[in-house]
Amino acid sequence: MAMQMTSRPSSQAPCNGTALWILIALNLLIVQFFGFIFYQQYARNSFSSDATIYTVPQILRGGQHHPILDFPLGDAVALPSVRVVEPGDSTTGASNNDKYYGGKGDKKHLGGFANNDVDMQGVSPAAWKFMIETHGIKSMLDVGCGRGVSTSWFHLHGANAKCVEGSHDAWEQSLIPNELRTEHDFSRGPWWPSETVDAVWCVELLEHVGRNFHKNLMPAFRQAAFLYVTHSVWGGWHHVEVHSSDWWIARFQSFGFVYNEYLTKQIKDVASSHREDPAPNGKTYNAQHIWTNMLVFINPAVASLPNHAHLLSGPSCTEGIIPKGQRPCDPAKQESTLPPNFEPLALTVDMDIVWEKHVFGNTSITKN
């Protein structure tokens, strides 16, 4: 006789529709709650001009500040170089070793700038013009500015330009007003500008600063969206960090900066193509340091901020594909245009003449 099987009643009650919707609602409330907390602590602060700015690394560390990778906190204290007692002391800077270089009365790691002259290997008005008109640079910090040749070009062409230099001898020969420059020796401690800038310009400095002092140098770089830096591949006065471009790329990327081949090639090509341009001193704007060993890095923590959104300028509309050429967007063609603050600084030939006379005492420019 076959046994009749009966189903065993389930110990779990079926989930009705009301309970399911309650569960979904609770999950949504939890997600919204934690989203609100994140916004209050991080996101809202990122867009408030008077609030602490949290970078991505800080968020990943729960808001803890890192002295190298994050924005510097507070105001920096400038630490001028310690002068030697006698100019002929064995610790005296580059001027004691080579009369071409400045550095009288400075310690041996300072000086190295052209003494009452212009180092034409680091000067390229064409590259600077390209930075303003194409990269959109409107503010800059010249790190290791020497007498301020580069800084003065940007200042006299309408940019918000400042410089920092460790040599007191360079300070005494400076071409720029006191309010635009800071005397600071990075071997004594860190320094950084009070505001972020579009660019750092740093030519022929890196090889002079030992890597044990990079922790003092990087906070200044952290305040810039773009870094334009050169390095030396040969020996020289106090060249204590001579390395290949690959080494420097690895070094800067270890501090969170992103190397950009596209921007690097652009600036090197411009400097190279204008290296025969005549200068008022009978030489040319050779700019060898720039077209041989310049590297351009992006600092996303600054470049992504709203007040640097104007970077990477130039026309952006075209009739066809890009190789046919780009043009300014035209409202008559139903194309939206950018706000005025996205336009690059307007440059004139008169600005070039004023700068050449300021630096060289005369000009090589003939106005048409």
Image (spheres, rainbow, N blue to C red):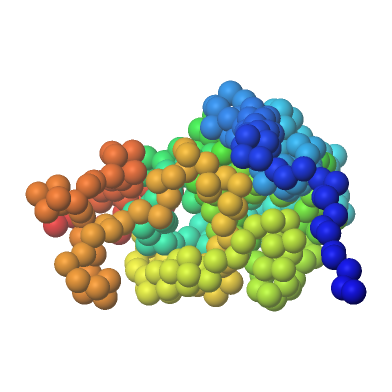
Residue 334 visible in the current orientation: yes
Compared with 146, 276 (above or below) is: below
Residue 286 visible in the current orientation: no
Compared with 114, 290 (above or below) is: below
- Measured as percent of width and height from the top left, residue 209 is found at 76, 57
The outermost residue toward the left is 332
Residue at 28% in and 58% down: 316
Q: Is residue 320 left or right of residue 275?
A: left
Q: Quadrant of residue 8?
A: bottom right
- Measured as percent of width and height from the top left, residue 130 is found at 37, 59
Residue at 82% in and 41% down: 188
The outermost residue toward the top is 50
- The image quadrant where one finds the N terminus is bottom right
- The image quadrant where one finds the C terminus is bottom left
Front residue of 37/324: it is 37
Front residue of 112/267: it is 267
Residue at 55% in and 66% down: 260
Residue at 69% in and 61% down: 252
Front residue of 258/356: it is 258
Compared with 199, 36 (above or below) is: above
Q: Is residue 332 left or right of residue 13?
A: left
- Measured as percent of width and height from the top left, residue 222 is found at 65, 46
Q: Is residue 337 left or right of residue 122?
A: left
- Measured as percent of width and height from the top left, residue 3 is found at 89, 69
Front residue of 219/116: it is 219
Looking at the image, how many numbered discs can be counted on the residues?
A: 0
